[in-house]
Amino acid sequence: MPYQIAYLPVVVDDDLPKLNADIRARIRRAIEQRLTTEPQYYGEPLRHQLKGFWRLRVGDYRVIYRIESQTIWVVAVGHRKVIYALRPVRFLWRPS
């Protein structure tokens, strides 16, 4: 059964618009092709204070997400060098 993809508003409003069109298309394609089918297979679980979240590698970019039942919540998208340091508040988010 395919997973549904949901984005935090900050991802749609801030993260994705900052990327150039080619990278943005590549990331969206990876999300649609990989995360809707087997998010545990393509992703890697994060550890320590980010336990419960997963990452998807797309070149030098990372998609941080959380799996809740049949919904994949994308909480952050960005370059690998800054994704973890600049978004600590987002990692406190839990679906209601």
Image (spheres, grey):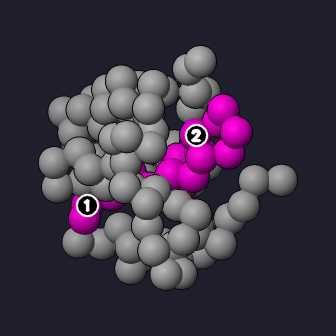
Nearest to the eye among marks 1 and 2: give it. Answer: 2
For mark 1, give the secondary structure.
strand
Q: In this view, does 78 lie above or below 41?
A: below
Residue 78 seen by the camera:
yes
Which residue is rendered at x = 50% and y = 51% of the image?
65
* Badge 2 element: strand
Could one spot residue 18 in this view of the protein? Answer: no
Tell me the residue that label 2 is attached to. 72
- Tell me the kind of residue under disc 1: His
Residue type beneath disc 2: Ile
- Image location (x, y in percent) of residue 49: 53, 81
Which residue in the structure is indicated by mark 1?
Answer: 79
94 horizontally vs 4: left or right: right
Q: Residue at x 37, y 40 (%)?
A: 41
Q: Does the CB distance between marks 1 and 2 fall below 8 Å?
A: no
- Please give the range of residues in magenta: 63-80
- Foreground residue among 37 and 65: 37
On screen, residue 84 versus residue 71, left or right, reads: left
